[in-house]
């Protein structure tokens, strides 16, 4: 039987799963996933065939959810990619000196919700209030939208404006029924998620790859190889130096950049894949998650082949 103190979290996790959303356990009263990292993986249970990261472990299976939350009062994380959601995170200032930059302050902006309201006004669009909304522990808002079909949206930080982030492919949010630092996340508007407005989807669409021209470098052949080595090292460094919440995005960008050189015949795909997989493992990404991200990035990079003239 589930201990009474665990039951609210279990009920909340099951409610999310019943909506078809994929959940993961979070450390109690924290935002961190309560799942082992690859370095500590024993290759047993779900990981018998290889380590699975949090996105692969996310589930909407009520039996799996029940087994997990019966074991402890975990918070509820919602994996936005598998759930086919885009969540717009409207944050609030973290301290008195955390104020809007001039371009937003002039418009009277004081928080992420104000930024979204200003964007709506600029684009002649209504504020998208009629969608599933969660109030965060610090007083911000999470607006849930269904992801548009055929558009591979990723996480963004500040792309829409100050104090406005988004979570989509490769991301997760703290769901209602959780607490972080003693502050509860609560359902603010309990309606189904609306489709992501087209104008927001356009703003969040990944920037197209810029036109690439062959790099003309009148160097000796041995220095040509040194240039390629430096290019690979730079992209590996991009991954290994990325912040904890930016590993997957950094891996994707690195894969796109090196995918251009692979498509141009400059680098072997197997070599690039192996180096990027090593970098992903170094920062604790799951093998399957990393492999999918690398394939996706290489595929995008292949659309803009790049060569280096010797």
Image: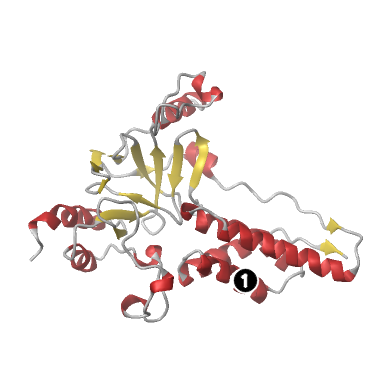
Badge 1: residue crowd in 10 Å (few <14, some 14–19, many ≥20):
some
Image side of residue 168 versus residue 30, left or right: right
* On screen, residue 250 above or below 269: above
Point 86% across, 71% down: residue: 222
At a point 42% along the width and 32% down the height, the residue shown is: 112
In the image, 178: left or right of 219? left
**Is residue 39 shown to the viewer in this render?**
yes
* Residue where numbered disc 1 is placed: 275
Q: Is residue 45 left or right of residue 234?
A: left
Is any part of residue 189 visible from this angle? no
Quick check: 128 left or right of 159? left
Q: Secondary structure at mark 1?
A: helix
In the picture shown, does residue 12 fall above or below 306? above
Image coordinates of residue 284 in percent, x first then y, are: 47, 66
The quarter holding residue 65 reads bottom left
Q: Residue 128 in the image: state x and y as whole percent.
A: 38, 33
Residue 233: x, y in percent? Answer: 68, 64
Question: Whole-percent x and y of residue 248?
Answer: 51, 58
Q: Is residue 57 above or below residue 160?
A: below
Quadrant, the C terminus:
bottom right
Q: In the picture, residue 49 is in which quadrant?
A: bottom left
């Amino acid at each position: 039987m589930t201990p009474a103190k665990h039951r609210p979290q279990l009920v909340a996790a099951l409610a999310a799963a019943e909506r078809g959303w994929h959940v993961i356990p979070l450390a109690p009263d924290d935002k961190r996933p309560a799942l082992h990292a690859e370095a500590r993986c024993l290759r047993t249970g779900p990981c018998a065939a290889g380590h699975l990261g949090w996105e692969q472990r996310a589930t909407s299976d009520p039996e799996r959810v029940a087994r997990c939350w019966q074991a402890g009062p975990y918070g509820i994380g919602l994996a936005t990619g598998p759930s086919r959601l885009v969540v717009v995170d409207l944050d609030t200032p973290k301290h008195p000196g955390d104020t809007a930059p001039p371009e937003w302050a002039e418009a009277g902006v004081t928080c992420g919700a104000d930024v979204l309201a200003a964007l709506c006004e600029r684009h002649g669009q209504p504020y998208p209030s009629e969608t599933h909304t969660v109030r965060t522990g610090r007083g911000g808002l999470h607006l849930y939208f269904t992801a548009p079909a055929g558009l591979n949206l990723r996480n963004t930080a500040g792309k829409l404006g100050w104090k406005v982030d988004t979570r989509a492919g490769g991301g997760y949010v703290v769901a209602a029924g959780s607490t972080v630092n003693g502050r509860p996340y609560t359902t603010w508007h309990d309606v189904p998620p609306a489709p992501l407005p087209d104008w927001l989807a356009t703003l969040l669409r990944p920037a197209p790859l810029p036109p690439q021209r062959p790099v003309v470098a009148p160097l000796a052949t041995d220095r040509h190889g040194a240039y390629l080595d430096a290019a690979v090292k730079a992209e590996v460094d991009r991954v290994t130096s990325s912040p904890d919440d930016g590993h997957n995005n950094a891996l994707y960008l690195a894969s796109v950049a090196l995918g251009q050189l692979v498509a141009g015949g400059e680098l072997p795909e197997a070599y690039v894949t192996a180096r990027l997989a090593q970098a992903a493992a170094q920062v604790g990404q799951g093998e399957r998650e990393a492999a999918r991200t690398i394939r996706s990035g290489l595929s995008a990079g292949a659309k803009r082949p790049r060569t280096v003239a010797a």
